[in-house]
Amino acid sequence: MDAQINLSVKVTTDLIQSIVAICSLSEQEITLHTELEKYGFDSITLTELTNNLNKKLGLKLTPALFFEMKEITVHSIVQQLCDKYPQELAACYSGSSKGLSLGGKGVAAEPELVFRKPQPVAASSVGETLTGGGFVSVNTAKAANPFRTAACVTGLGEGPLDSQRDSGDLPEQAWPSLVMNDRVKTYDPKPCGAVAVIGIGGVMPQSDNLEAFWDHLVKGDDLITEIPSERWDWQAFYGDPMKEANKSQCKWGGFLKDAASFDPLFFRMSPNEALLLDPQQRKFLETVWQTIEDAGYSPPSLAGSQTGVFVGVTNNEYADLIAESKLPADSHSIVSNAHFLIANRTSYFFDFHGPSEAVDTACSSSAVALHRAVLSLQAGECRLALAGGVNLLSSPRSMVAFDKAGMLSKTGRCRTFDKQADGFVRGEGIGALLLKPLAQAEADGDPIYAVIRGTAVNHGGRSKSFTAPNPSGQAEVIKAAVARSGVDPSAISYIEVHGTATTLGDTVELEGIKNAFAELRKQWGVQSVPAPACGLGSVKSNVGHLEAASGIASLLKVILALKHKELPPSLHCNELNPFIQLDDSPFYIVLERQEWRQPVDASHRKLPRLAGINVFGAGGVNAHIIIEEYEQPAQPEPKSADEPAVMVFSAKTKNSLREIVQATASFAEKESRFELLHAAYTLQTGRDEMEERVAFVSQTAEEFVEKARLYISGQEIGKEEGIYETAPPAVRQGICELIGKDVTSQRYVDMLMQSQQWSTIARLWVNGVPIEWVKLHPEGTRSRLRLPTYMFAKQRYWIPRSGELNRSREALDSTTGKAEVSPFSAVESAGPEEAVSRYFGNKISSMLGIRPEELRMDKELQEFGFDSIMAMKFKYEVENELGLLLPMEVLGESRYIKDLAVRIVSSPGQEELWKAIAGSCPKSDIESLESDQLDALFESLNRKLYGQTVLP
């Protein structure tokens, strides 16, 4: 006891001397129970204190030590040091430690960046049983180097790793040895509560889709750019935030290529409403549609299902633009810019009946959203779940605030793990996963990307400050996730770290991870320290900090890595942060592209690749996710290699239709395992059926590609080409009336299918005749494939910073073609119904923000976003203009403009209203029309008189 007291006294003396040297106070002013913060200590001076203590005491402390304490006082520091390092301190003060003297007056070497020297290790064969049961180096020749990767032995090209190895370009010793682990005593491949990832979707910085995102990651691309001018003029806000108001020195970010584009009519939304809508809502709607299609399901097929929606969101910067524009208050504002709307609007549009929640825990939001989705599935609240995150940057206000707080990197890069790390750079992204219980996904034959084995969430409690990370809290959440997963921690071979790229933050996170795995090893009875075989990386080095979407970005990176069996490099780590101590740990940093080798245990049994995703939020909410590789069963073989396939495509517009066909043809050319009949099955049963259609009857993938190229080129297509397009509306309507839903028609279609009249079936389908495609595919004979998903029209909706509402929509002509004469233009009416229709059509099109010719008479008003809010606005405008009452019951019962006109004209007591409307309509004056208007009118009439009237 006396020795312990004496040790505490000596440590206290040296600690006070170090504090005095840093804060320029006298020893008499330092008390044992006063928090160091009152002496002016911050993260920088705590780091300096760490260096001084390492020199005096011969320890390898990191600043994370201080963030494990609720109160940082002399007493608590001394107690922590004596509890954790009693032997090291005793050796220091006994004089037995070389280079140190009593009282801390001797000085040892300062912790520096030191690469661990490779130690000669005998190569292990696959069948050997390893002592200690811990990790085995992924490459024993480089086991002691924290920067070790496969490419350190020899460079890698940009081609697929498997092909490089098979071709002999890389020597065998360049490839990591298989991990063997004799401690994995129990492994349940189908644990209770495991959740399958069956669909993914998203857009990331400089990546229009996840295929492009993975291509960037695996090549080690830096996706940070200057702030685009269409967001804001960074030069107007450039300056020292500590000296000037509303200034920032950060001009960089990870930005989407096209955050402003949207296809409102696809989602039954008016363009004017879309302009006010938070772009995060818009992009999430598109991402969810594509995520469902990626799983091989038609989104409408899930309508009415117990599907939950969980989305992480923190920012709402688009509201700044609306406020700055000084637009008058609009009734749609109440459903435009709030966090809850992102989840709730998604559930509403897709008609999902499960939980619908927006989650805001700062940077951990999307990871917590995934955790909530998993729990909801396990509790039976929903049968499917969509989990994701959104983050878009619309205003410089937050950028200025982050920079003023000293959080942003002056170099504009996230240098995770690096000695020069000086903060993060902001980024944006949208991502979503479609989840289903594993057992159900397997029973349904779903293609599965990966399996969520365990998730955990906690709060770190009180730490040094509200926004400071807590390594103890992070260690606890990791242990909880691993415990729930049921996996041996030594089987985890990769961890995607949060990696906010600050010297202190990275150190604290790595300490939490190391402490968690050290405790887990003890729980599993592993006494020795394993050799490095668990890679560490951070997607933030590529795309920046995506804030609320950072968790989903990390998840998508790991899911894609599992799919491709490769680990992408982490960027910008040139000199390791000296406080990141990877000695005596199972971890190494992945700095080069490398194969993600599959581990095996001592019994030669192959184990699935396992990874952890670590995420924490600025407010103290931590999350950890354990995700596992899934081996997809072999697809059933096609019934007959000579059997033709009917490849069907549909879209809202011709442009979108061509883009989908082009994307699918390119995919078929590139994908070596493309199976035509499985692809046809996916398109027939896993896509919504829309107005614009085309079908290809082909016997081989090559034939389909050739026909698709011909269709895309716009060349004239002969009748024998096996390419079938939608006929003009009148012809299509006639076909649908001839072959309806009656029993006789259905028997006729069944007869065509039984006799394999593929061309006739294709002709009927493109013209709207319903086909029960599942009858062509007996159960178990086909599999859903992952094919390119829907291509939305790209029209720009963004409130400009000028303050003027710009309702113009870019690329409109490219999606709708040459403008036609409006059906509501001023031509001589044949009666009151036409006059009322013309009046209502012009007014409604103006309110919706579309051109009158786009407001088709044969479509329901709801298709254009004419909702209850818009109906009330319409009612008030008409009544104010005419001074007469427009009954709400008449308006509510009318689905089409024509219906509304008929009701007004035929309803008793509405004569005064329709006469007032007719009197307000302008008379026709053909002489006042411009020449281009006359030309358009002539073309419209000519098409109606002499358009195609036979089936093409």
Image (cartoon, grey):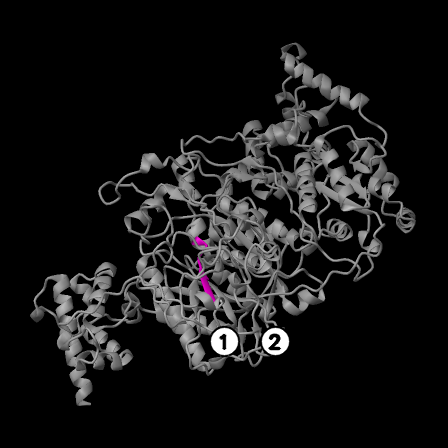
Label for residue 483?
1
- Please tell me which residue is depicted at 70% across the width and 64% down the height of the picture: 633
Classify mark 1: residues with Cα within 10 Å, few (<14), some (14-19) or many (20+): some
Q: Quadrant of residue 5?
A: bottom left
The range drawn in magenta is 534-540
Q: Say what amino acid the circle numbered 2 marks.
A: His
- Asked whether the residues under the numbered discs 1 and 2 touch, taking CB atoms below 8 Å apart as contact, a structural biologist would say no
Q: Camera-side residue: 285 or 4?
A: 4
Which x, y percent locates residue 359?
Answer: 47, 58
- Please tell me which residue is depicted at 54% across the width and 38% down the height of the picture: 261
The answer to whether residue 599 is left or right of residue 937 is left
Which x, y percent locates residue 418?
Answer: 35, 56
Which x, y percent locates residue 115?
Answer: 35, 63
- Please tell me which residue is depicted at 32% across the width and 37% down the height of the picture: 237
Q: Say what amino acid the circle numbered 1 marks.
A: Ala
* Foreground label between 1 and 2: 2
Which x, y percent locates residue 813?
Answer: 61, 28
Classify mark 2: residues with Cα within 10 Å, few (<14), some (14-19) or many (20+): some
Q: Camera-side residue: 359 or 635?
A: 635
Residue occupying the far top of the picture: 927
Q: Is residue 359 visible?
A: no
The answer to whether residue 206 is left or right of residue 918 is left
Q: In what quadrant of the picture does the N terminus appear?
A: bottom left
Q: Secondary structure at mark 2?
A: loop
Q: Secondary structure at mark 1?
A: helix
Mark 2 — residue? Answer: 604
**Marks 1 and 2, how far apart at CA:** 25 Å
Q: Camera-side residue: 278 or 572?
A: 572
Q: Is residue 248 visible?
A: yes
Q: Quadrant of residue 129?
A: bottom right
Task: Indicate which disc, 1 or 2, sits on the residue closer to the N terminus.
Answer: 1
Q: In what quadrant of the picture does the C terminus appear?
A: top right
